[in-house]
Amino acid sequence: MPNFISPAIVLRRIDYGDYDLILTFFTLKIGKISAIAKSAKKSTKRFGGILELFSVLEVVCSSRMDRDLMILQEADLINSFSGIRADLNKTAYASYFAEMVNEWTELGAKQEELYFLLCHVLKQIDTGCISDEISGILFLIRFASIAGIRPNLLKCSICSLEIDKIKEERIIFDFSRSGIICPKCAGGKSAGRLSLSKGTIKQLLWVENGGLIKAGKMKFTPLAIKEGLDLLEAFTAYHLGKEMQSLKFLKQIRKE
Ligand SMILES: [Zn+2]
């Protein structure tokens, strides 16, 4: 079996026995893979101590017979993103993004667009060029589009009334319909719904449709950040069928 070479982001790292590590990489070329790094714990010389969470590496792996677990032969550092691991809030956000990608992707399924999105937001939170919260909004709304669960924020999911024609400033989002609902169609039901301001929805639409760089430069009000994150975190958890462990941790940090 020939060696496989690709840029790769470290999504998970687990100790395996006294000497080895098992890593989950999100690679550019073939999506998610698992690989064992022999003696990585015993000797830091073996991989130079670069097998850290969220780092971007160029990896060389060889396949075993079963193909579910590759063997890491070599790794070179492309970007360590060390600013993330030095900060609890940044680590919490990066862990959340990594867990989402790990949870949603299948082994060996190429996901180029998601790879570049993850790289982009990791770079943003590493450098701190925009707030971690806005990176969170950017990641989640783009993730939803790539995962095929794009929320309908443009018009009422029942009567198709456009958002600009809805007069009320507070608008209902319905999870089971994956979209907004106008006051006339809303009825009295409140389970599985969130209310948010029209301004927040407009900002989410801009983030969804603008380029990654432009979206990162947008100004958000504190209310839009809070409402946007509340909506997107609950919406993606609803569609993935569970809340990520790392999101629970992130919510705990926010309260402190
Ligand atoms: Zn309606």
Image (tube, rainbow, N blue to C red):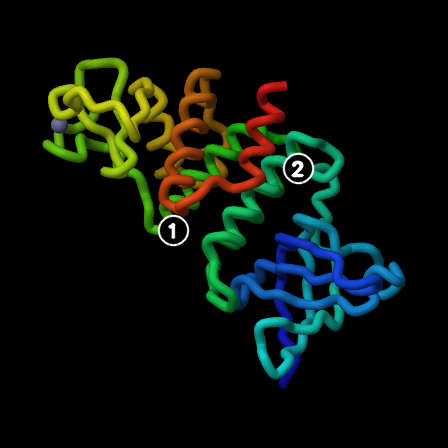
- Mark 2 residue type: Thr
Residue at point 51%, 68% (across, down)? 108
In three-dimensional space, the C-alpha distance between marks 1 and 2, rounded to whole angstroms, equals 23 Å
The answer to whether the residues at label 1 and label 2 have Cβ atoms under 8 Å apart is no
Q: Eyeballing the image, is 39 above or below 206? A: below
Q: Is residue 233 above or below residue 182?
A: below
Q: Is residue 85 left or right of residue 251?
A: right
- Give the tally of numbered discs: 2
Q: Is residue 17 visible?
A: yes
Q: Quick one: quadrant of the C terminus?
A: top right
Three-letter code for the amino acid on which mark 1 is drawn: Ala
Residue found at x 32% / y 24%: 194
The residue indicated by pointer 1 is 147
Residue drawn 33% across and 50% down?
148
Q: Image quarter for residue 57?
A: bottom right
Image coords of residue 133 (percent x, y): 54, 28
